[in-house]
Image (tube, coloured by chain):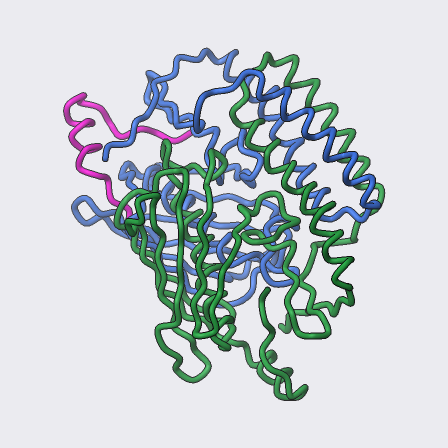
Chain colours: A blue, B green
Amino acid sequence: MPIKYTVVEMSEDELEQERVAFGGLAQSVRELAEASLRTTVPAEVATEVREEIERLTARLREQQIPGAFGVGLTSSGVVRGHGNAVVGMRNPIAVPLDMQRSEEGRAWASFHLNALYEGPPDTVHGGVVALVLDQILGEAAAAGGSPGMTGTLTLRYERNTPLGDVSAEGWIDRVEGVKTIVKGEMRDADGQTTVRAEGVFILPRWAREALERDHRKPPRFE
Amino acid sequence: MPIKYTVVEMSEDELEQERVAFGGLAQSVRELAEASLRTTVPAEVATEVREEIERLTARLREQQIPGAFGVGLTSSGVVRGHGNAVVGMRNPIAVPLDMQRSEEGRAWASFHLNALYEGPPDTVHGGVVALVLDQILGEAAAAGGSPGMTGTLTLRYERNTPLGDVSAEGWIDRVEGVKTIVKGEMRDADGQTTVRAEGVFILPRWAREALERDHRKPPRFE
């Protein structure tokens, strides 16, 4: 079933205001989330804080979009994925990644994974590694002009990834028709590879047809 | 490198208090996170709410554990993974999953994925599917008495998973020495399979040796 992108018309000033006010709001929720996981305040204090949080939630809900955030496509073809679960600046569960990209089909990011991303003790959850690498491999495919949806993703966990500073990278290995094969890896603070990944990304037929109909290039992710 | 589990001594009453006060706190942060993503209040209101959130964060940080939450192992061998990124009741980014398990090596859960878990518009992020399935496959291995760390994980995305009510399941396919091969799948609200997964879980040598030394059974996840 085709996925619907919304065309958004936002000026540079409006985008900047969104970044400051609502990106800042999301960042404050990220910090609250980490604090609420690690706190050892008395149960009464936790309950008081919870009640204040519920009041703030009600205030934010006074005006809201009806459903999920969606992905906007500006008239110049730039994707505004501010709700994305991995990179969305407005999404509090997103790390978020400050993704770097190059046109030959490479994407990479250095970031910090705190207590919120734990699986085994002091260790990044194996599924979080998969979550991040899926996004990075997909962005590498898009950066190289061969965007697609994840078809398959294979991860090989070679060693534990300690929580803390980490980095990840993806690069197009080859393109075979509508399939883009992307490789990538996760690295720990010392730059040692901990997990290797390979993904096959496929641009669905409806998306190819839409692009051809509009004589458009694939969308860019920025 | 061995992973350190902490032995925790908590009574049933203390565990229940943790569930109510701190599980409740985490749940309120989950709802705030979703509201902050979807809100369309004026930028000034967003900034005011942010300031109040920062005040609450400071209050929670007055007393906190020094690092990540870790995984506790009670004296009866039950794992207390309340900080876990997927199932942790105290972790606001966790869905969380109410995992069901059976001793023949099966784990499953029905849950709701809201706007926070979005990738493509109205669609569960492919990496979120991987995140959840990694956890469920690992729990299936543990439930069947063959726990392990993720060695490899392979995902085949057959169709999009719409945001909303979903379910996932994992089951031990076979055990080959120290390797437990687990299969699983994600299903949409209609029960249709959207993503298939296969994982190989391996109990590290240090863990096998520790279990043999202590004449213990593998830990149970509850």
Where residue A215 appears, x then y in whole percent?
Answer: 17, 22
Residue at 36 percent of width and 48 percent of height:
A171
In the displayed structure image, the side of residue A188 where residue B77 appears, left or right: right
Q: Quadrant of the N terminus of chain B?
A: bottom right
Where residue A189 appears, x then y in whole percent?
Answer: 61, 55
In the displayed structure image, the side of residue B76 where residue B158 appears, left or right: left
Q: Is residue A214 magenta?
A: yes
Compared with B54, B86 (above or below) is below
Compared with B12, A140 (above or below) is above
Q: Quadrant of residue A17?
A: top right
Residue at 63 percent of width and 84 percent of height:
B216
Where residue B53 appears, x then y in whole percent?
Answer: 72, 28
Compared with B116, A108 (above or below) is below
Q: Quadrant of the C terminus of chain B?
A: bottom right
Q: Quadrant of residue B58?
A: top right
Q: Which residues are magenta?
A: A200-222
Say whether residue B121 is visible: yes
Q: Residue furthest front?
A: B13
Say whether residue A200 is visible: no
Residue at 22 percent of width and 47 percent of height:
A179
Where residue A11 appears, x then y in whole percent?
Answer: 46, 11
Callout count: 0
Q: Is residue A92 magenta?
A: no
